[in-house]
Amino acid sequence: MSQKTPRNFFKPLAIGAPAPMQELPTRLERMIHFVPGHNEKVRSKTPAMAPKVDVILANLEDAIPADAKDAARAGAIEMAGMYDWQGTGTGFWSRVNPLNSPWFQDDVTELVLKAGHQLDVIMLPKVEGPWDIHFADQYVAQLEAKAGLTRPILFHAILETAQGMSLVEEIALASPRMQGISLGPADLAADRKMKTTRVGGGHPFYRVMEDPNEDGSARASVQQDLWHYTIARMVDACRMAGINAFYGPFGDISDLDACEQQFRNAFLLGCAGAWSLHPNQVDIAKRVFSPAPDEVKFARRILEAMPDGTGVAMLDGKMQDDATWKQAKVIADLADLVASKDPDLAAAYKA
Ligand code: GLV
Ligand code: MG
């Protein structure tokens, strides 16, 4: 037998560690806002930024120069104390360096021992398979026990290798600590040998062309989504495991329209949020990952038309049944969550 028994799956992995969560906390995670831990100027804006976003993440991995890794870690621990993370609706996460790096052990040890009470989620990059999650799971349990934590820290894996992609279902199911998975389009493109230097988004050369015209005139072609398969598979893996999928970074911070479109595709396919690498992507994510007021109104009409969720109803010529009731519930529940945090949208959903 290569799996834990059902009863053991939810047992703490170290004596004195908190019991794993059976249900994930229901939290709004429309954007995971990246802050370079070593950058004093950006870091100092944490208390002002925290109320404007759903999650702030102290980044210790890529984009942090090797000689600033210690400073980034110290900065992350400072950020933990800069805001009342547990008393508000804003999550505090950190992206640590990969398991095979010289920094992983110090990153995780110091974060859990010095900031474990504030830290909600550790983002693990370049996860190759369930064995990476198992190692980190055991190690973090030991540290949680040592730190006397009463609430377990969750894990978020980044999907950024071909092997990780092939094993995404096993990664999603590897531990009750798993909170979600993000697409890492830059690392994944490199590992797959995709021929693009872009970080997420489309590519002008990835298209489908219409058949030749009889008159020999120019044929239309349309750009396709390079990431469709990856995101759809990631969403299935995550939802099977009862965790959330996230679009990762959109690297061209000057192309707000393309960012919005890519985020929207991810939202429609089932993702809960995306990363924001710049404050101008925060508003995009807020807009895209909150359901539109019209959709919310229609969803609520469906729920009202079928109070017990069964049977059939006609609304504006559209047939509703038990399945569309469930679709409506997804939108209405998300709207309630958004409304609990965002007074403007709460008003728009009521109007
Ligand atoms: C993110 O880490 C990426 O590699 O795209
Ligand atoms: Mg990466």
Image (spheres, grey):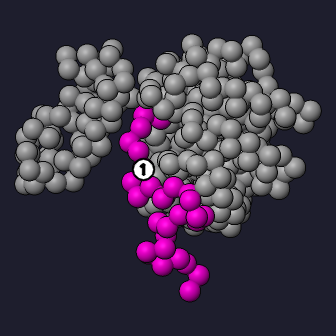
Residue 210: where, in percent of width, then height? Answer: 56, 44
Could you say which is closer to the camera, residue 177 or residue 65?
Answer: 177
- Based on the picture, tell me whether residue 127 belongs to the magenta stretch: no
| Magenta segment, prevailing SS (helix, strand or loop) | loop
> Which quadrant of the figure has residue 89?
top left
Residue 215: where, in percent of width, then height? Answer: 57, 38
Could you say which is closer to the camera, residue 121 or residue 209?
Answer: 121
Magenta range is: 1-30
Q: Quadrant of the C terminus?
A: top left
> Where is 171 relative to 312, above or below?
below
Could you say which is closer to the camera, residue 222 or residue 19?
Answer: 19
> Where is 9 relative to 64, above or below?
below
Residue at 33%, 36% in the rendered image: 334
Q: Which residue is mark 1?
A: 24
Please, what is the three-letter code of the amino acid marked with disc 1?
Leu
> Which quadrant of the figure has residue 83?
top right
> Where is 48 relative to 123, above or below?
above
Residue 118: where, in percent of width, then height? Answer: 57, 35
Residue 98 appears left or right of 271: right
Residue 266: where, in percent of width, then height? Answer: 50, 40
Mark 1 lies on a secondary structure that is loop
